[in-house]
Amino acid sequence: MKRLQQQMDFLREIDRLKQVQRRSLLLHEERWENSAEHSWHVAMAVWVLAEHANEPVDVCKVIQMMLLHDIVEIDAGDTYVYDEAAMAAKAGKEQKAAERLFGLLPADQAAHFRAIWDEFEAGETAEARFAAAVDRLLPVTHNHGTGGKSWRMHGVGRSQVLARNQTIEEGARLLWQEARMMIEDSLPED
């Protein structure tokens, strides 16, 4: 019974991810995306795009990474990738959030979930590199679909977007080519 209660407590707590607002507009510009929607969308994108990873990947593991990667935002909030000061403080806040949130689970699940989250954060495996590539690709896709609207709203230029998203290439060269075309199509040269 205690195990089930811990699992239910975790599931109730992660429902709060639906309240974490991101700075990417939905493709139809109706509203800002929330982190739960983003996590679902990138998990689906991994499944669809796995054949484009630079190296063979365990698709199930990458999907798990995508479902877990932003849970820490419940406590730490979403960090806008173009805000350098906020990015510098991100790791500490997210580590603390990971301890609390995964700590709600039974010890074996907590350790397993935390290991997957830590692997994503370290970015050293083929799975983590591909997960990071897809995680960066979808905001580019959203911005392309809105003519770069959220980038423009936040004063982010083409060179900044190219520099920040070039990491896509480490996980999926073909996806980086696609992202680069979308960025260049959405933003004028600086």
Image (spheres, rainbow, N blue to C red):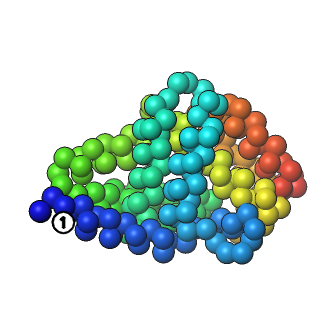
Q: Is residue 75 in view?
A: yes
Q: Quadrant of residue 32?
A: bottom right
Q: Position of residue 66 (x, y in %)?
A: 48, 49
Tell whether 182 sits left or right of 64: right
Viewer-nearest residue: 178 or 157: 178
The residue depicted at 31 percent of the width and 43 percent of the height is: 115
Image x and y of residue 91, in percent = 41, 55
Residue closer to the observer: 154 or 108: 108
Left or right relative to 76: residue 157:
right
Residue beneath the point at 79% across and 59% down: 145
| Figure check: 73 above or below 180 | below
At 69% from the left and 66% from the top, the residue drawn is: 26
The residue to which callout 1 is attached is 5
The N terminus - image quarter: bottom left
Q: Secondary structure at mark 1?
A: helix
- In this image, 65 relative to 166: left or right? left
Q: Nearer the viewer, residue 188 or 133?
A: 133
Q: Residue at x 62, y 30 (%)?
A: 51
Please name whichever residue, 176 or 95, is drawn nearer the observer in this view of the structure: 176
Instruction: Tell which residue pokes out farthest to the left in this image.
Output: 1
Using the rendered image of the protein, determine whether residue 155 is visible from the camera's viewpoint: no
In this view, the residue farthest toward the top is 55
